[in-house]
Image (cartoon, rainbow, N blue to C red):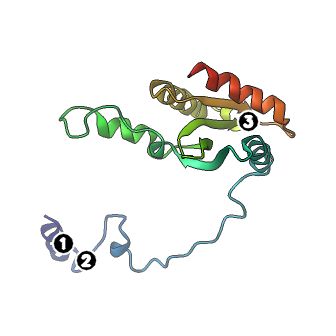
Amino acid sequence: MKWLLNLLRRLFFGKNVSFGGKRSEHPQIKLSYRPQKSLFTPSEKRFLEVLESIAGDVFRVYGKVRISDILTPDVNKWEKGSGWHWLFSQISQKHVDFVIVDKQFNLVCAVELNDSTHELPERQKRDVLVTEAFASAKIPLVMINAKSRYFEKEIADAIASVVVKFK
């Protein structure tokens, strides 16, 4: 089928003309990137330091984890009309700020640090979807409001109060 499309392009345009987004179809575009200044915002860094202190030697903390690496649709992927692809598309490009796992890498909970962007209507829709997805998988999702300073006891208590509900 692709050969037919290329043939039609050559007939009408006299050369290979690209309408897609594949790298091989855009050889004139030079790969040009620059590094981000930091993986985390200043607020996320401060929060991560507190999370790591709470985790100690018992748990591990990972940041910016793709939700589809944590959850998967609970339907048969190969059954026609199961909705697997639609369900997967709802989470495939979303991340949580942090996950806490035990030493065997079993998920303890996910943590979202809610800054002012979470007040935007689009972000609120995203938050509802993420909250419902984690609830359906019975995985604790801890929502913490972003602050200029974090206290270990306050964060540990917030995490414990959510995680305990799932045990």
Q: Earlier in the sequence, mark 1 or mark 2?
A: 1
In the orientation shown, which residue stands out farthest toward the top? 165
Q: How many marks?
A: 3
Q: Position of residue 76 (x, y in %)?
A: 25, 35
Q: Earlier in the sequence, mark 3 or mark 2?
A: 2
Q: CA distance from mark 1 to mark 2?
A: 6 Å
Q: CA distance from mark 3 to mark 1?
A: 48 Å
Rendered image: mark on residue 116: 3
Q: Position of residue 149 (x, y in %)?
A: 87, 39
Q: Position of residue 15 (x, y in %)?
A: 24, 80
Tell me, yes or no, whether the two marked residues, 1 and 2, touch with CB atoms within 8 Å: yes
What amino acid is labelled 2 in the image? Asn
- Mark 3 or mark 2, whichever is nearer to me: 3
Q: Earlier in the sequence, mark 3 or mark 1?
A: 1
- Label 2 element class: loop
Task: Please tell me which residue is depicted at 79% across the width and 48% down the height of the picture.
Answer: 49
Residue under pointer 1:
6
- Label 1 element class: helix
- Mark 3 or mark 1, whichever is nearer to me: 3
Tell me, yes or no, whether the two marked residues, 3 and 1, touch with CB atoms within 8 Å: no
Task: Please tell me which residue is depicted at 51% across the width and 30% down the height of the picture.
Answer: 134
Q: CA distance from mark 3 to mark 2?
A: 47 Å
Q: Give the quadrant of residue 145.
A: top right
Considering only vertical position in the picture, is 112 above or below 5?
A: above
- Label 3 element class: helix
Residue under pointer 2:
16
Q: Quadrant of the N terminus?
A: bottom left
Relative to residue 2, is residue 142 drawn left or right? right
What amino acid is labelled 3 in the image? Ser
Considering only vertical position in the picture, is 24 above or below 82?
A: below
Q: Position of residue 151 (x, y in %)?
A: 85, 35
Mark 2 surroundings: few (<14), some (14-19) or many (≥20) residues within 10 A: some
